[in-house]
Amino acid sequence: METRKAVMKVKEDDLTWKINIPSSFGFKKLVSRFPLVIITLLAVFSPSCSTVPESIDSPGSVDPGPSSSCSTAPEPVITHASTCSTIPEVIDTTGSVNSTDSGVIPVYTYKVINTYPHDRNAFTQGLFFENGFMYEGTGLNKRSTLRKVEFETGNVVQLYEMPEQYFGEGITIYEDRIIQLTWQAREGFVYDKESFELLRNFDYPTEGWGITHDGEQLIMSDGTAILYLLDPETFIETGRIQVSDADGPVSRLNELEYINGEIYANIWQSERIARISPNTGEVVGWIDLQGLLSPEDKAEKVDVLNGIAYDEVGERLFVTGKLWPKLFEIVIVASGK
Ligand SMILES: [Ca+2]
């Protein structure tokens, strides 16, 4: 008997299987006679079944879902993403809370409590709150100042204009003195807090970005991932803090504030503040400040978020930015709230 070959092709995902069938059987005839055989063959050779993942490299973290239906197998469901460092966890789809780029380091968002006017011409580089007033250091060439501000109104009640050659940076108040850094001049200044009289200057070997203190030592940033500890009387370096998170060193540390045992640092050109352990240098939390400025606020030129101040008595946290029209009093909101 002459034989012919009937060929059935099953093509999925560019893979083709050929099943040879004796010529005495037509395909329809074959199916009608042996339906279970055909179904079994299709099931065994279907590539979509063989590619359903058994697991993702995360013990206990992935449920592959029902596997009885190959064509409708759902995407793996992440059930315990917090235990898996390779899979981002998105708790809140608004983006206010996630740990995508920071492992298990919590990311906080914020709530605006009050909004106050802020000088649009103030290129804020340092911010410090004391006794009901905001002290601010501003930058830019020929525009750098030290100022005392009635923060409720934004009125400048005391002003010192730096010599033209200096680009002002961070400020802090230590006891009865105001300390102000400069960006690249490697020179800092000390003023009397009440009169703004220049008392002395001091040198440092790096750029100057932000400055704060913990009551005993000055803490200075220079745009790297290092914070420098300085003696507040001699300005001699007494130690360093290497700042890092789960991804490694955290650079671009800018304006600083020491708050309840942590160092808060603006990250330059981002809308985030790092909460840093002064003991380990580890980032223990991120504050995501996206959305503080409205589109109307940005109608005129603004620069980056920069400026953290804390009212220890009233437990109020203030933030602003360079050339921002507003100063914000905010509270930090924990994940998912
Ligand atoms: Ca500050």
Image (cartoon, rainbow, N blue to C red):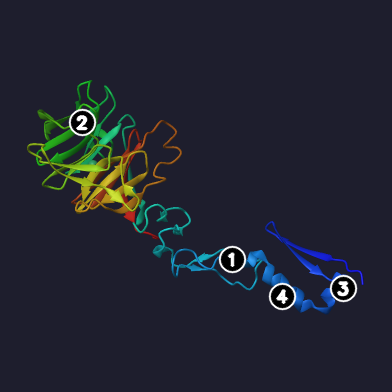
Q: Nearer the viewer, mark 2 or mark 1?
A: 1
The verdict on label 3 being within 8 Å of ligand 1 is no
Element under disc 3? loop
Image marks 2 and 3: residues in contact by CB distance under 8 Å = no
Q: Which residue is mark 2?
A: 146
- Decide which of 49, 16 is in the foreground and name it: 16
Label drawn at residue 52: 1
Q: Earlier in the sequence, mark 2 or mark 4?
A: 4
Q: Label 2 sits on what residue type? A: Leu
Q: Nearer the viewer, mark 1 or mark 3?
A: 3
Residue 80: give x, y in percent of width and height: 43, 67
Q: Label 3 sits on what residue type? A: Phe
Left or right, residue 31 beside residue 148: right
Say if residue 176 shows up in the picture: yes
Left or right, residue 224 beside residue 195: right
Note whether 26 is above or below 333 in the view shown: below
Q: Which residue is mark 4?
A: 40
Residue 200: give x, y in percent of width and height: 9, 29
Give neighbour class at mark 4: few <14, some 14-19, many 20+ (Cα, 10 Å): few
Q: Which residue is mark 3?
A: 25
Residue 333: give x, y in percent of width and height: 34, 56
Q: Nearer the viewer, mark 4 or mark 3?
A: 3
Element under disc 4? helix
